[in-house]
Image: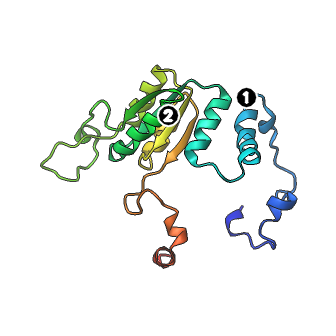
Amino acid sequence: MKCASCKMKPRNKCDKEGFDCTGGKMSIDECLEEANKPFHRLSGHFQKECGNNLSRLDEVIKFAQAMGYKKIGMAFCVGLADEAAVLEEILSQYFEVHSTCCKIGGPKKEDFDVPKVKEEKVEILCNPVLQAKMLNKKETELNLEVGLCVGHDILFKKYSKAPVTTFAVKDRVLGHNPLAVCYSSYLRKKYLKKK
């Protein structure tokens, strides 16, 4: 499949006409399973109700409320601690919020064969598995990822018992906005030259 680079005109034929380029050979019966229906359908309901006027935060709040969730978990990167504090304050108006910092438990990099940035210093390793375990212990019903590193985000999702949605991704260079690569002609040129 190469949907992202599809040259079909109009480009939105899939969206407007429901064109099936799979030849009808792939089943989507999982969308009809009772446990999956709300996840599959709620965003469509929000778009009908609100158009395109919801921020990511609005969507998270509306989704969690519609699901009847009371406990929200948040796994955040220490580099986004200020942003996580603001999110926790806002979300606490609606839910019981539990948050875990990436450095929880204080594992040292050298104990896990992870290279240090500065050899002379003690450096603490991120701990997404313990972040997930702590939120599991609190029995959160939905977990938010806030700026976890690539790899750590994968481990957090793997060990989280609650469903996980990404609130913010880490991008140290682009202000946590990796889509800037798509919007800036300068950045596109930089990365397309690496072909």
- Residue at position x 48%, y 48% in the image: 168
Q: Residue furthest left?
A: 120
Q: Is residue 21 above or below residue 154?
A: below
Q: Is residue 135 above or below residue 166?
A: above
Q: Is residue 40 above or below residue 12?
A: above
- Is 59 or 195 nearer to us in this picture? 59
- Residue at position x 45%, y 39% in the image: 87
Q: Which residue is mark 2?
A: 91
Helix, strand or loop at label 2? It is helix
Counting from the top left corner in percent of width and height, residue 141 is at 57, 26
The amino acid type of the residue labelled 1 equals Ala
Q: As drawn, is 161 to the left or to the right of 147?
A: right
Question: Which of pointers 2 and 1 lies earlier in the amino acid sequence?
Answer: 1
Q: Quadrant of the N terminus?
A: bottom right
Question: Quarter-wise, where is residue 123 in the image?
Answer: top left
Q: As drawn, is 115 to the left or to the right of 190?
A: left
Counting from the top left corner in percent of width and height, residue 116 is at 23, 49
Q: Residues within 10 Å of mark 1 (few under 14, many from 20)?
A: few
**Mark seen at residue 50:** none
**Mark seen at residue 35:** 1
- Residue at position x 54%, y 70% in the image: 183
The amino acid type of the residue labelled 2 equals Leu
Helix, strand or loop at label 1? It is loop
Counting from the top left corner in percent of width and height, residue 181 is at 50, 68
Counting from the top left corner in percent of width and height, residue 104 is at 32, 32
Q: As drawn, is 104 to the left or to the right of 92?
A: left
Q: Disc 2 and disc 1: Cα gap in Å?
A: 25 Å
- Is 2 or 61 nearer to us in this picture? 61
- Residue at position x 59%, y 39% in the image: 60
Q: How is the image coloured?
A: rainbow
